[in-house]
Image (cartoon, rainbow, N blue to C red):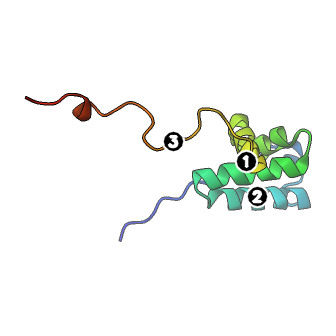
Amino acid sequence: MSAKRRKPIHRCGCAECTQHPHGKTARAHRTINRVLAGLDEKSRRRCAGLLALERGRGGVQALHEISGLSRTTIRRGRSEIQGVDRPGGIRRVGAGRKAVEKRHRRS
């Protein structure tokens, strides 16, 4: 039986968690990191974006410190939650370059 590798849970390095590792804030940050560690990439990004939205101004930086996720990843999740359409996202069906096999016929 092969053991499934789990992603290690990030430890928050904020001042509150360092000074009071058993405090209420440290417990909340550990809970956030436990939840994020169990999610896939897309869900993790969106969850972090939602938490950043709830915190308001400075939420992206706070989530960056708590979770260790990139600020651009958190911003992207926040915009996905808000429903902002990004140009250059997913292509339409049939869009993009044609496959090489379809362009060149063999005679």
Give whichever of discs 1 and 2 has the lower sequence position.
2
Say whether residue 64 is visible: yes
Side of 41 relative to 60 (left or right): left
Side of 70 relative to 56 (left or right): left
Residue extending farthest bottom: 1
Q: Nearer the viewer, residue 16 or 43?
A: 43
Q: x and y percent of residue 72 in the render? A: 70, 35
- Name the residue: 89% across, 56% down: 25
Asked whether the beta carbons under mark 1 and mark 2 sit within 8 Å of each other, the answer is yes
Which element type, helix, strand or loop, lies under badge 3?
Answer: loop
User: Which of the labelled discs sits on residue 17, or is there none?
Assistant: none
Could you say which quadrant of the image residue 69 lies in? top right
- Tag 1: residue type? Ser
| Residue placed under numbered mark 1 in the picture | 67
- Name the residue: 45% across, 63% down: 4
- Tag 2: residue type? Ile
Q: Is residue 18 above or below residue 22?
A: above
Give whichever of discs 3 and 2 has the lower sequence position.
2
Cα gap from disc 1 to disc 2, whole angstroms: 8 Å
Cα gap from disc 3 to disc 2, whole angstroms: 36 Å
| Residue placed under numbered mark 2 in the picture | 32
Q: Quadrant of the C terminus?
A: top left
